[in-house]
Amino acid sequence: MTDRLHASCVEIGGRGVLILGASGSGKSSLAWRLIDEQGANLVGDDQLYVWTKDHHLYVRPALPGLIDMRGIGVIERAHPAQARLSLAINLDQAPQRVAEPQHHLLCGLKLPCLGLAAHDTLAPLQVAMALRTIGVTGFSSTGLYRDER
């Protein structure tokens, strides 16, 4: 089963981050900031295909190598053919002080999901930290996470 999503996706350190939100919520802007500030690789922007394999979620771009940059236009970039998803970011959901365990259901599998504000100055760092913690071990019942970096 394959689902088509209106979302963006980047990969950091071999882990995919799905960026969800309404049109104009800042999905492409956050992807650009992750590329620039965290060394992320573009997987896809605007339209993605998601599927399962061996109980994991994977994503590939519907529009390979293309990403919007507001004020300039569409930019073509190198991109991996697919990525294994580890985390979802929901730009339509208000950030919490301490992440409450939430998941985004795709193709029958749960993906850890955080609400973030796309244009917050800490958003790229929050995504990278969440990917290294929640994206690896899942949500902590105490709200305490260890950064192994």
Image (cartoon, helix red, strand yellow):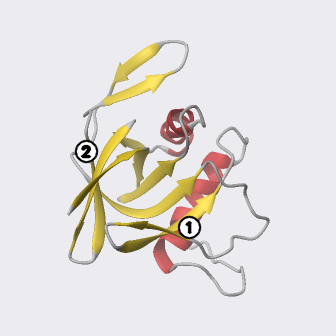
In the displayed structure, does residue 110 sit left or right of residue 138? left
Amino acid type, callout 1? Arg
Q: Position of residue 100 (x, y in %)?
A: 68, 74
What's the mark number on residue 99? Answer: none
For label 2, the residue is: 80
At x 34% / y 73%, what residue is drawn? 108
At x 71% / y 80%, what residue is drawn? 144
For label 1, the residue is: 149
Q: Is residue 45 visible?
A: no
Q: Nearer the viewer, residue 18 or 37?
A: 18
At x 27% / y 77%, what residue is drawn? 55
At x 39% / y 19%, what residue is drawn? 74
In the displayed structure, does residue 123 sit left or right of residue 66? right
Mark 1 against mark 2, which lies toward the viewer? 2
Q: Position of residue 123 (x, y in %)?
A: 66, 48
Amino acid type, callout 2? Pro
Q: Nearer the viewer, residue 34 or 107?
A: 107
Q: Identify the residue at the far right of this view.
A: 97
Q: Residues within 10 Å of mark 1 (few under 14, many from 20)?
A: few
Q: Could you say which quadrant of the image residue 62 lies in?
A: top left
Q: Looking at the figure, which quarter contains the C terminus? A: bottom right
Q: Nearer the viewer, residue 82 or 93?
A: 93
Q: In the rendered image of this protein, does residue 82 appear above or below residue 86?
A: above
Q: Position of residue 116 (x, y in %)?
A: 66, 52
Q: Position of residue 33 (x, y in %)?
A: 56, 36
Q: Secondary structure at mark 2?
A: loop
Q: Marks 1 and 2: CB-CB under 8 Å?
A: no
Q: Nearer the viewer, residue 109 or 118?
A: 109
Q: Is residue 109 visible?
A: yes
